[in-house]
Structures are given as C-alpha cells and as structure tokens.
Image (spheres, rainbow, N blue to C red):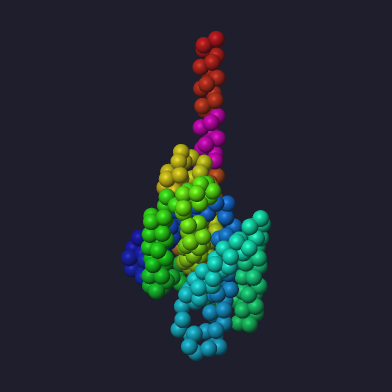
Amino acid sequence: MISAIVDYEFLRNAFASGLIIGLVAPALGLFIVVRRLALIADALSHVALAGIAGSLFLSQNVTAFAALNPLYLGIGSSVAGSLLIDRLRELYKSYEELAIPIIMSGGIALGAIFISLAQGFSTDLVGYLFGSVSAVGREDLYTILAVAVITILFIVLTYKELFSMSFDPEYSRAQGISSRALNIGFMVVTALVVAGSMRIVGILLVSSLMTIPVAAAMQIAKGFRQAMLYAAVFGELSVLGGLFAAFYLDLAPGGTIVVISITILLLVLGGKKLAASRSAARNEEVETGEL
C-alpha cells in the first residue's frame, strides 16, 4: 500500500485530502454538536448535492461549464444554504429547528430535479455521493487544503468567542460579542468543510465524520480542548483505516470510514463500561475488607 501511494498520484491526493479532512471535520464538529446543530451537516450536504448535480447537468449542456470542477458549484450552493439556514433561524427564533429540514428538503428536491434532467446518475455523481479514492485530483486537494486553512484560522482566531457562544449565548451577548457576525462566519465555515469533505466521505455520509468521532471523544474527554484533540485523533484513525480498507477491498471510502468510526465509538463505550465495572468491583472489595 505504501509503495502504491508513492507510485500513484491519485492515491497521494486521496490520502492527503483524507488526513486534512480527518483533522478539520471533527474539530469543527465538536462546536456543531455542542450547539445542538448536528443535523446541519446533513442539510448542507444535500444542498451541496444539488450544486454538484446542477454542475454535472450544465457540463453536459453548456460548453462553458464542461471544464468546471463540480466541487466549486457544490461549495457555492452549500455556502448559500448555510446563509439561508442562518436567516431562517433568525425569522423563526422560537422554532429554530425548522430551518434545517426546510433547507434539506429544498436541497434534495433540487438535486432530484437536476439528476432527472441529466438523465440519471453518472459515475462522477456516484463518486460524490459515496466518496471515491481514485477521483480525487490535485485541484480537489488544493481546494480541500484551502478550506482547511480557512477553517483552522477561523477556529483559532475566534476560539474564545465560539466557546462562549456555544455554551452561554446570553453571556457572550452581554460581553459585547457580535453573535450575528460570528454565527454567519460559523455557518459559512461549516458549509465549506461539508462541501470539501464530500470528495472523500461522500455527500450522504459527510455528517457522520463531523459527529461520530465527537461522540466517542465526549465519552472519555475531561475538558473541551481534550475532546477536540480526541475527536481529531478518532477522525484521523477513521479516515486512514477507511481509505486502506477501501483500497484493498475495492469499496466506497465513505462507507468504510463511517463503519470504522462507529467501531471506534463502540470500543470507547465498551471500554468505558468495562472500566466502570472494574472500578465498582474494586470499591466493593475495599468496602468488604473494611467490614
């Protein structure tokens, strides 16, 4: 496998992209989970699907779009969807959760229309849906790298504000933090990560990489920063394991990445339960000895 990565550019692109996404997606996903927005990645991924399907349709019918990377229109539509979600959350302040199913439904509907106009699924579209090792080009890698840089800078520069807004929005507003601007920035960055991740994980599974490693990390972490570190480690293990399995077994990488991610979660839950049982048994022995 190592020699194949050295010999083939598409494998180098896939593994480099996977390493980047495996780090960035769970790190941002921790803020998403804490803010109880776990379903937003699903909504934005379906909006990105509409952009990808629309780009593939246009490439078949408009010469000017033939050479355009579908990832760009997918990113654009995902960002637009994130801004619409933020706007709807403002309009329905008492029912903010309505925004996500509305945008998700719109994304699915537009995606279905463009797919039918393009006369069904193409190989490219299937790769975007479930991820693909062989389809990641150098241009995709550079785009994913740019998304990662923007995301990391945003988290680093606004960490204190994001942390405060995630756990205590009222306090952050009282401190003069511009929650409106920060929310918009957060939504846009989330859209970029969702769209950037779909080349490796796939549109239908990208939300899993942003939430399952976080779910595992929250079981064993003793603080927020530690949870972010564990989530990134679990994300990297899931991506690397998934890409190796996809390469050797000729499977869609998105599925293998998510299965390994779920396996890690189950191992963490099982390990935590076993540790708790042993601790209870030791305490019982101590109490019995004292008697």
Q: Is residue 243 magenta?
A: no
Q: Residue furthest bottom?
A: 63
Residue beneath the point at 39% across and 67% down: 146
Q: Which residues are magenta?
A: 268-277
Residue beneath the point at 35% across and 60% down: 2
Q: Is residue 21 left or right of residue 107?
A: left
Residue 197: percent from left, percent from top: 48, 64
Residue 104 visible in rendering: no
From the image, give the main secondary structure of the stretch colored magenta.
helix
Residue 232: percent from left, percent from top: 43, 51
Residue 226 visible in rendering: yes
Quadrant of image for the C terminus: top right
Residue beneath the point at 61% across and 74% down: 111
Residue 87 vs 29, above or below: the answer is below
Q: Is residue 270 magenta?
A: yes
Residue 238: percent from left, percent from top: 47, 54
Residue 71 vs 186, above or below: the answer is below
Residue beneath the point at 66% across and 72% down: 109
Quadrant of image for the N terminus: bottom left
Residue 53: percent from left, percent from top: 57, 76
Residue 222 vs 55, above or below: the answer is above
